Image: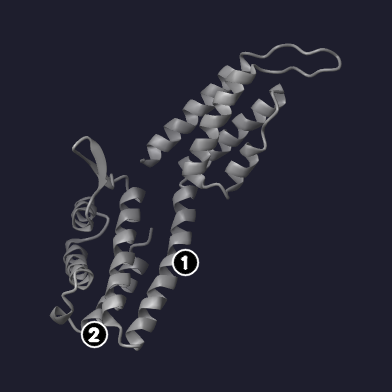
Amino acid sequence: MKLEDLVTRAEELIQKGEQVLSTTRSGSRMTPAYVDSAALAEFRTSSLAFLSRTFGEKSPNFKEFSRIRSIKVSAVREGIAILRASKEELEGGWLITTKGLLSAEIFSDFLEMAEHLLAENYKDAAAVITGSVLEEHLRQLAQKHGIDVTFEKSGRRVPKKADLLNAELAKAGVYNKLDQKNITALLDLRNKAAHGHYEEYNKSQVELMHQSVLDFMSRVPV
């Protein structure tokens, strides 16, 4: 889902929360004002699903909203406030920045693993791991720049291949044609390793591949 779609969905949920508030019933001196329980349940379920998919269940956004169980008006207002803050994060690009930092840390671990495998002369495994990191980096770059990473085929959405993402990223000006050609060659080496064509490349080429991916990811970060 594109960033603008996430922002739109957050706004829809905020409006749903406002609709829940419109069901407010006056309480007594001993009981605070409350809202319709069914409307609240729908609002809460939809919001938790959105926050889980977008920010993750370990995020403060999800954790804070998940604590809202009361039918009190104040609880609904708290939920709307959390959604407004989440919407601001999306509009400010903080979600992408955070994901980029996490991805960089994870990718670094995998590339370090590939480097260790190369040192132990396991060039084939190193090529597959390095190529997989590159492919996922392309996918996240596409998401960052609003390029759809799936397409419709036979009535369902399927992931685009890395070569297609590479072409679309270059066309969008995310990086230049020289980078595109280099990535095409790197993906070709990765495919040879993944399909068992081990004799078609050597350790030196995998070492160059590893360095090229490191260089590309540092120059074109998520």
Question: Considering only vertical position in the picture, is 176 above or below 91?
Answer: below
Work out which quarter of the rendered image holds the C terminus and state it. bottom left
Question: Considering only vertical position in the picture, is 118 above or below 219?
Answer: below
- Where residue 133 appears, as percent x and y from the top left, is 34, 66
Task: Residue 53: give its label.
Answer: none
Residue placed under numbered mark 1 in the picture: 105
Q: Secondary structure at mark 2?
A: helix
- Where residue 84 appears, as percent x and y from the top left, is 56, 34
Residue closest to the eye, 18 or 130:
130
Comparing labels 2 and 1, the label whose residue is closer to the camera: 2
Residue placed under numbered mark 2 in the picture: 203
Residue at screen point 25% across, 45% down: 158
Task: Tell me the amino acid under the disc marked 2.
Answer: Lys
Q: Quadrant of residue 113 in the image?
A: bottom left
- Where residue 132 appears, as percent x and y from the top left, is 31, 65
- Specify few, some or many for label 2: CA neighbours under 10 Å numbering under 14, 14-19, or 20 or more: some
Residue at screen point 19% across, 58% down: 163
Q: Is residue 2 visible?
A: yes
Residue at screen point 53% across, 22% down: 16
**Cα–Cα gap, marks 2 and 1:** 25 Å
